Image (spheres, grey):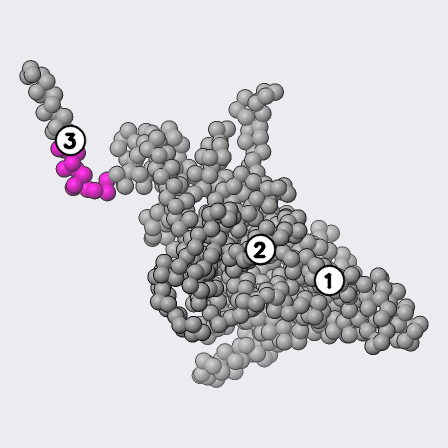
Amino acid sequence: MNVQEQLGRKANGMAMAGSILLHQRCKHLGSLLFNTGLVLDLGGATDRAISALARLGACAATTSLHQKKKAMELHHEKRLKETILQRKVSVVHDAFQHAALVPVLLYSTKPSQTVYFIRALLNCTPCTVGSSVHECPSSVHEPQWDIYGDNVDHRVHAYHMTKEARGSDIHWFVLVGAPLRVTPPPHLDNTRPRRPILEVPNSDFVPSLDDNRSLRDSFVFHVLEVLVREIPFLKQYAKLVPEYIDHPYVSEMSQKSDYCILDLLDKNESKSDDIIEILEYIHKFIAQAPTSESRTVLERLVFGGDVLTNERSYQGQLDLANGTSETERKMGVLLRPEGLHLCMNFCKYIVENFHTPSSAKDPGTMYNQKVNVDRKDLKTDMTQGYNQCRHFVNDDLDGHIVAATMQYFGMKSLEDKPTRWGPSPLFPMLGADLQLEQITAVAEYIVEHVVLYRGEDVATGIQNVDTDVGHVDEAGRHCCPFGGCEKTYKEQHWLKRHMRNVHNVVIDLVAAPRKEADESYDGVFNHASAFMKVALLFRDLVDSYHMGDGDRLFRDLKYLMLHFDMGHHVKYRLWTWRMMAYDTALLSERERFVYRNNASINLVGKTRKCIANDHLVEIHVHRIKQALRAMGANVTYQAARRAAKCMDAVNELTDKLASHRSGEHATTDRSIDVQAMAMCLSTHEVFTHTPGREHSTFPNQSADLLQNINLVAVNTWIGKQKARADREMQVT
């Protein structure tokens, strides 16, 4: 061996020894380079930029990042399968506590892959026969999951378009999963349905008197928040007002949620075959126990999305209704329209009723207020401008509340002191409870005398119609309510004619009398009052999702269904009713608890910071589209799927590195616009009763949009939907 070869071998050894020393000095140097590269890739850095930084030693190379993403994808799939398996073992363990040998279909639908779990394999202490006491390690009990999904629609443009090489439209489906934060107590019964849907009175689907009183209290709270935020001499008492409307699961809903992208499927929800395959994929997460002839679903999970996703999934379940088992019929999937699109549609309903360009000349109307504060960004298309519309509706509502408060205290401007009903000089000396009680009395006055909420007319009217006109049978025919008379009719007016001719009973139900029929009719005041009703309901609906308050949400759904009926939003009217049908009758007690108390997800871990579940899906859809745009014309399904599965892990890493951030958006001072709107309303004395006046664009304005609802038509429609649900939703 010559000298040159010896020097070469020494150089190689020294290089290897130096590498080992450097690795021992900083074992996480490779992790740092990979993490830096992944964060750069998430932030939209191009491969050229990452390669340049890799040459400088700042991050890993693009090829290494590609291999790391592959490894992360495999790890994601492995952990997901382990989680599914662990949850199924937990469900089977709870369902068969006293079985010595438990057959359960775990991950595959093939009978040959049925796995038998013996109690010893569950690492549980065997219980005596007939005993209800059972010991099980906590590691077995994996929490239940909800799944949400939506389409990812993307247009790929060809760099050089030819006859063969043209642009293409991508339609994939993303699924996001999240463990339940509010889990059902073990004592709840899982027998379904709780009661037959046909036995549920129609009046249970509309607001009751208790619902009206509860909603009034919520309105008072929202008005009270505005008073201590916008009225100068009341701002010092803001700390007396509770931070939120309390409910039993505030602590659970204030915790940061866990979630992850389950998969990106090469499926399009608009295609019948694809939506069935999506349902089959979701069914992999559900534990099933095979019986002699059919496999029984042991636990059903909620699949949420927008109304279009629910509509397609519902039709997919109907297409499979002839299956011989619950698994073949995909009965383990419960459909739930989620809150973001529900709020968007209700905001659209408000804009349709109050935002009219021809009303720009009418002072105090929504369009006039938009011109006054120069809100040029306001768009009526909710898909493009929902946030702008939501903020403007809330600001306009605050302006109405402030103007009504100024009229109550006799103030010409916000800088003036109250001239009537103002706090006494001894008010600062009172205790905190008495101070809050007196301020709350002002909010109650505004709700009762300005908002003029009268929803009890609807509930009472529906009960009368349901009693007098009779019910609808399974065939959708109207039955005569008189005992001994078995006549049924296809149309309700034929039944009414039969009752008039045979039983000498006249049914002529109309809505409550309109305000313009009175001599004291004030169309301007009625317009402001009607707007405040729906705007406060919209604020309470959004707040129920922010708080994760399921009881308040399902109370508000009753009002939303009636408003959607008035606005001819037929799909949202139908699905709000179906949500109530699930909640009222079709689900078991355990499923109902899960269905109504997990409609929100928390990304920051703070109180009143929850978002609707489909909002989380929209965030992931936006991130996936960003990744697709970065790929350009070279996008492929495998690359997009890999990027989607790695996305949550890289985002979590980025959030940890950016821990100094507050997690809140920058806020804009809205008080200037609110004060301008309030002064416009106060100057034109909108809240001072002046009989005979009205806006030219809104003639014959009633003080409640629900005042002219057709109760007979609503009752008939609910009866038909109950008959349809008995045929279809019991199967699905």
Q: Residue at x 12, y 21 (%)?
A: 8
Q: Sequence-wise, which precedes: disc 3 or disc 2?
A: 3
Q: Sequence-wise, which precedes: disc 1 or disc 3?
A: 3
Residue 11: x %, y % from top left = 12, 25
How far apart are the two marked residues, 1 and 2, measured between alpha carbons? Answer: 27 Å
Query: Residue 437 or 511: which is nearer the viewer?
Result: 511
Residue 432: x %, y % from top left = 45, 80
Residue 310 visible in the picture: no
Q: Is residue 58 left or right of residue 345?
A: left
Residue numbers of the magenta segment: 17-29
Element at badge 3?
A: helix
Q: Residue at x 23, y 40 (%)?
A: 29
User: Which residue appears farthest toward the top when viewing the image?
Assistant: 2
What mark, if any, has residue 16 been given in the picture?
3
Query: Residue 593 or 286: which is nearer the viewer?
Result: 286
Locate residue 707: give its quadrant: bottom right
Q: Would you name the residue on which mark 1 appears?
A: 723
Is 18 one of the magenta-colored residues?
yes
Q: Residue at x 15, y 31 (%)?
A: 16
The C terminus, quarter of image: bottom right
Residue depth check, mark 3 versus mark 2: number of the one nearer the observer: 2
Is 615 one of the magenta-colored residues?
no
Q: Identity of the amino acid at label 1? A: Ala
